[in-house]
Image: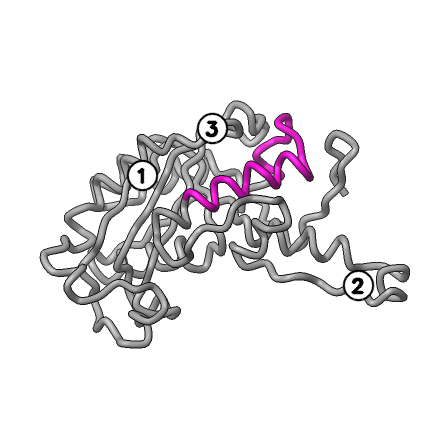
Amino acid sequence: MHHFANKEIHFANKEILNWAAFLQLKAKESKDIRLQNFYNNGTYHDETKLKDIEFVALDFETTGLNPQQNSIISIGLVPFSLNRVFCNQAKKWYVTPQDKLEEDSIVIHGITHSDLKGAPDLIRILEHLLDELAGKVVVVHYRRIERDFLDQNLRALINEGIVFPIIDTMQIEADIQQKQTSGFVNWLFRKKTQSIRLGSSRLRYHLPTYPPHDALTDAIATAELFQAQVSYHFSENTAIKDMWL
């Protein structure tokens, strides 16, 4: 159990890893110069306080939910700190998919074939994307999309994947819900877990409603959600090792 400013939260299934040392090792092992440069930027010492960290919120729109069969079609990111979201530094790209853009995915995210006409493939923007992420702590809402899709898509394109520390606001929210609904009293009063989807989670912190399924809008929404989660449940002095996976 961690204690932060009289606020408690327990992280289940916490992955413990010395990320700084791991990225140094990956820099030596990588055969791609773009990935070497990314890993050589390193990351923060695991005792670094959240208030001293530069974050970047990242969101992908994809052709489906299986990273081994589907691919990225839109990327949105925005740098932020605990106190500010730097919208003037936000970036968004459409990306030519490696697989077929299916009609059911168009219904979900609204990205059409005409939107993707002339869009670069992932390799053409990879160096720029990695430059935006390098040295920062990446924050996402559901890491199985952003980390797994980037890893699998790169394996298909350059025969080498990617791994990096990540903060998952969905996992944070799941752990909060588990803490708030566990125990005999909560069972007695039949207190149930609430939705941990991005929009539903934001409502619990009285954050405004944004249209979903746009990569840049969802990245901004994720940044704001993390700021709220830290304010409500943690502290600016919380060590990054207690947050990242």
Q: Is residue 122 left or right of residue 181?
A: left
Q: Amino acid at mark 1?
A: Lys
Mark 2 packing: few (<14 Cα in 10 Å), some, or many (20+)? Answer: few
Q: Main secondary structure of the magenta part?
A: helix
Tag 1 residue: 28
Amino acid beneath label 2: Lys
Residue at (89, 62) in percent of width and height: 184
Residues packed near mark 3 inside 10 Å, few (<14), some (14 to 19) or many (20 plus):
few
Judged from the image, the secondary structure of the residue bearing numbered disc 1 is helix
In x, y percent, where is residue 146?
Answer: 39, 54
Q: Give the mark nearest the N terminus, 3 or 2.
A: 3
In three-dimensional space, the C-alpha distance between marks 1 and 3, rounded to whole angstroms, equals 35 Å
Which contiguous range is marked in magenta?
220-242
Q: Does 50 sit above or below residue 76?
A: above
The quadrant holding residue 88 is top left
Residue closest to the eye, 150 or 26: 150
- Badge number at residue 20: none
Residue type at mark 3 is Arg
For mark 2, give the secondary structure.
Answer: loop
For the residue pair 243 and 15, the one nearer the viewer reads as 243
Q: Earlier in the sequence, mark 1 or mark 3?
A: 1
Looking at the image, which is closer to me, 114 or 3?
114
Q: Secondary structure at mark 3?
A: loop
Q: Which residue is mark 3?
A: 84
Q: Residue furthest top?
A: 52
Q: Is residue 148 above or below residue 88?
A: below
User: Mark 2 — residue?
Assistant: 191
Residue 7 as seen in the image, left or right of residue 111: right
Q: Residue at x 56, y 29 (%)?
A: 50
Residue 47 magenta-highlighted: no
61 to 6, vertically: above or below: below
Residue at 55% in and 54% down: 170
